[in-house]
Structures are given as C-alpha cells and as structure tokens.
Amino acid sequence: PKLDNSNNWHRFEAPAGSGLHSLGGASLFIGGIDGSNDGDSLHYAGTAYVGHGTDFWSGPISGIYNKQYDMKWGRLWSLSKADIIFHKDHFGDVGYEPIENIINWPGNGNEENGQAGQLAPYFDINENGVYEPMQGDYPLIRGDKAVYFIYNDDRAEHSGSGGRKLGVEIHGMAYGYNAPADSALWNTLFMHYDLFNRSDTTYYDTYIGNYANIEIGYPFNDFVRCDVQRGAFIGYNGTNYDSDYGGGFDPGPYPGYHGDLPALAVTILGGPYMDGDGEDNPYGGCDESINGVDFGNGIIDDERYGLTGFVHYWNNGGPSGNPNLAKEYYNYLKGLWLNDSIILYGEISYGVFGAVGPGCKFTFPGDSDSCNWGTGGVEPGGGYNQNNLFWTEEEHSYPPDDRRGIGISGPFTFMPGDKQEMDIAYIFARNYADDDPLELVAERIDQIRQKVLNDSILLLPDILGEKRTVFNHHQIMIFPNPISNNILHVKPDFVIGEIYYSITNVSGVLVQKGFLDTNVDRVIDLKNLVSGIYILQLRYGNEIQYGKFIKR
C-alpha cells in the first residue's frame, strides 16, 4: 500500500500502483480535561473532515508565526534508508552534496522563536545537540522508507471543532518496509506519533482516537467490525462484488475491487503510556493487557494501552452520526453517543433495534471478546457471546453502506512536558484465491504483532540499522521535588563516569546544560532558572534517562 494524493477523495492506494483505494481519510483526535471545574474544562483537537475548519497547523509550536515559518514547515520530509546510508558513507567526499531532505531535515527548532530545540530524530555524531549533516550527522527513520511531518494545535483558535487548545505538538512518521517476500510487512503501512504537551496545563481523562473513513473501493457497500484481542478495527465489503464508483458528490470514476475482495485493519500496536501505579502489571488478565504492550516484562510502569474502545458512526446528523463540536468528538472518545447516551451492546445506532445491553466499550466485536472485557466482565444480553451468536453487522442483517470509526486509547494523565506515543499499522489483505479476507487480515495482524514482540520493529534505531536499547524512563531519583531552593540532587541508575545533562522547559526549549561530576550523589545548581516545570535528561554513552521536576 501507499499514500496517494493524486485526487481529492481517496488517500490509501492498495495494492500500490493499482489505482484501487481502501481508505477515504484518517486522522488523530485528542481530548482531555484541565481539572478547573469551571464548566469549560474540556480541551480538544481533531476533525474528521477536510474543508470544515481546522484544529491543527503544520510545524512546531512557536512564539512567532509568519511567512518564513510557513515556508519552512508547511511540508513533508521523505527519505529512504538507502538515501541515508549513501549520505553516511559519502558526507566527507570532495564535492559531495546531500539531497535536499537530508540537508533540511528538521532536527532542530529555533529556540529564539520559542520552538523546541530538538525536533526530528537524528544521529548526533559529536553529541553537541545540533544537526550538522556535513559533519556526519544523519536522520534516523523507521522502516526502509519514511515520511516525516510536524503539526500543532496551538497556532490559532480551533475552527474545526471549536475546542479549546491543548498546546500539543505532534511529530509523525509514516513508514514501510521493502519486503516483497514478507506478505505481512509488504502489505502494511506504519504510523508513529510522538505527542508533546508543550503547555503548562495537566490534562486528565485524556484519550487519543484514531479516526478512519473506510472506503473499500466502492464507498457505499462496506461493513466494519473490531477485533478486541488483536487491537484492531477492520473495514471490508458487505457484498460479494465491489462495483466501480462513477462519481456523485465526489469526482470519479473510482474502480472497485470487483470479485477479489479485500479487508483493511487499522491496528493500534502501541498506545499511550498508562498512568503509573508502581507495579509491573501482569499479562493475561481480562484487562488492558489483552491488546496492550509491555505487560509482565519486569519493568515497572512502562505499560502502554492498546485498543481500549471502538465506536462506529454513521454519515448523518443523528445522535450516532457525524460529530461537529469538541464535546461530541470527546463523547465518542469516551464511548458515548453524541447525546451523552451510553452505547449499549447490540445497538447498531442510537434508538434503533437490537440493543440488549449492558453498556459496552467495543461495537461489532464479533467473537473477539471472549472474557467480556468490553462489558466490564458482564455477559451481554440476548444470548450474545455464547452458542455461536456474536454481534456483527451481518448478524443484524443491516445493509452495507459508508462506514467510519474511531479506535480509542486511554484514559491517561497528560502532564506538562510529557511525551506520549501512538503506533498504528494499516494492514491490507485481499482475496485472490477464494480466501476469506477477514481470516487473511487476522493472520497478518498476528504476524505484525509478533514482529513487535520479537524484532522490536516499533523502536527507532539510535544508529542506522541498529535497534536502540530500551531503558526504564522512571529511573532517575530527583530530590527535593518540588525544589524551593536552588540545589537539585540527582541519583541516576548509572553511577560511574562523567554524565552530560540538559534541562528543557515544557515547551522543549533548552534552558541549561552541563556535565555532572563522578560523585554518586550529583548536584545541579538551578539559581538561573525561573519557577516552572522542567525536564531533566541525562546521557552516559548510549544510555539516556529522563526525569521531571518543579522549581518553585
């Protein structure tokens, strides 16, 4: 598959070069509560529709937005591993000139303009914190080819949802693998997002949603379902033949998949980090460990959510239709209909036949929720989840049509300076030999998930071709915290050798740096820092650790 911007409607071409498309659009939603209890405590960003206002703008959060800013940041950066290897091997050659995307890789922001100092990832050969490609620095990417982008919700008022700003900055990387012999990798497009809270506000009950408008060829004959165990929601044809689309409110024509029917799975491989509880939560319960990651791995408080909810909705204006306002989007992220009603098990649409209860977190789960996690461990009514009766669109005999849905991950607390992550895979499978595309896409989800566990494919390499070592990001002991005088004591996990430290504010701007001596109890003088929240980074060799502190 590949991203395709050759028309104004479909965006996801699969197979690549076929002219066939299976996705009309996709985007991230994020919303949280600021805790003020003033009746206007929701902050939200994200819209489903192009041309109906916007909540996001290209580039990092900045103190200055002007024409020069737009020229620099209103773009994408596309690179292959081969491009980077060539640069790495030839940067010192006489007459060598790197390609434009390597020269202008956005490794650093303009701190004088209030931007974060460190942006796009790169290998820093002399560890001076400055991206210098002609000195041997080079971009770090995932996969064999990647497209990098940055956007934020802070530049202006949200004209799409009307939601209050969060001050979130999102760094995204779409990537894939050149692996024609591996059908799972060859048919998967990966998305990685880093979400930074650059504000001074803590957001509670924060959710991230991955919206997708399913368009499997002909856009009005589709079904959707979710797979709780695999952390995915899936679009597929609801008819035995996928017709061509001749156009209508969108220009056409667009070819259908005809008799070789596909399925597209939107899979959350790793969601945001769960709030810490001081435990290494075990794997295997009827809980978030069903499709989350890093459970039972011996590390405390590194667990990440997977898919914690799925909501489908209709292309209409009813209580289970298109959201328009921030509160309506946030309702879907919480698993509610637009009118605040709880979504009931079996309820294909608000107030429509089929509801048997109880309230549920996943719509159309089929047979994928064997322990009834989505209903809080309560067996659904109507005999569902037993005797081969499962909640799907087919079971309801509902006619296929235009389908869209939101994969949900949360809730979590989003503190100033925090970085959260989302790893998503768009996995395509097509029936060429009378195989069930749903069975085939399930097999490919399993194969991709196994690569996450065995091959660490979600990790950004520190050095090209080498996976980075994972370190517990809760290992630094900082005291006192909050600090009311100017002396900060630090006890990192590594205690020998000289350690480089850097301190950034919640906007990501570097405010202090230096080296710590070889004492076990290391001390940093903070007399030049104003009151606020700060992020401390320690680096020793290839090891990096983080901690957060408050200066009063």
Image: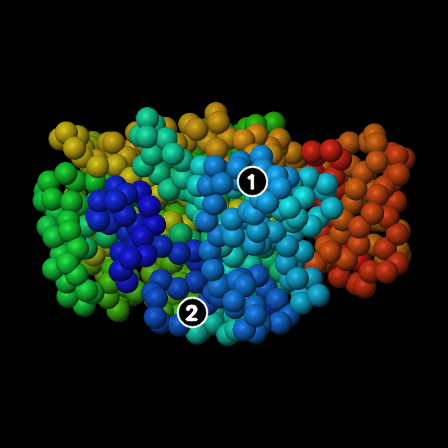
Give how far apart the Cα atoms at labels 1 and 2 are. Answer: 37 Å
Q: Quadrant of the C terminus?
A: bottom right
Amino acid residing under circle 1: His
Amino acid residing under circle 2: Thr
Residue at (37, 30) in percent of width and height: 179
Count residues near mark 2 (Cα–Cα under 10 Å), then give few for <14, some for 14-19, many for 20+: many
Residue at (25, 31) in percent of width and height: 440
Q: Is residue 71 visible?
A: yes
157 or 34, which is in the foreground? 157
Count residues near mark 1 (Cα–Cα under 10 Å), then give few for <14, some for 14-19, many for 20+: many
Please provide percent x and percent y for residue 221.
15, 52
Q: Earlier in the sequence, mark 1 or mark 2?
A: 2
Label annotation for residue 193: none
Please provide percent x and percent y for residue 519.
90, 35
Please provide percent x and percent y for residue 528.
86, 60
Establish if 157 lies above or below 550. Answer: below
- Give the left or right position of residue 430, taking residue 125 as reference: left
Establish if 331 lies above or below 497. Answer: below
Between disc 1 and disc 2, the foreground one is: 1
- Give the left or right position of residue 450, taking residue 469 as reference: left
Q: Secondary structure at mark 1?
A: helix
Residue where numbered disc 2 is placed = 54
Residue at (88, 34) in percent of width and height: 518
Is the C-beta separation of discs 1 and 2 under 8 Å? no
107 or 370, which is in the foreground? 107
Occupied quadrant, residue 530: bottom right
Q: Quadrant of the N terminus?
A: top left
- Give the left or right position of residue 179, taking residue 394 as reference: right
Residue where numbered disc 1 is placed = 87
Please provide percent x and percent y for residue 376.
40, 43
317 or 154, which is in the foreground? 154
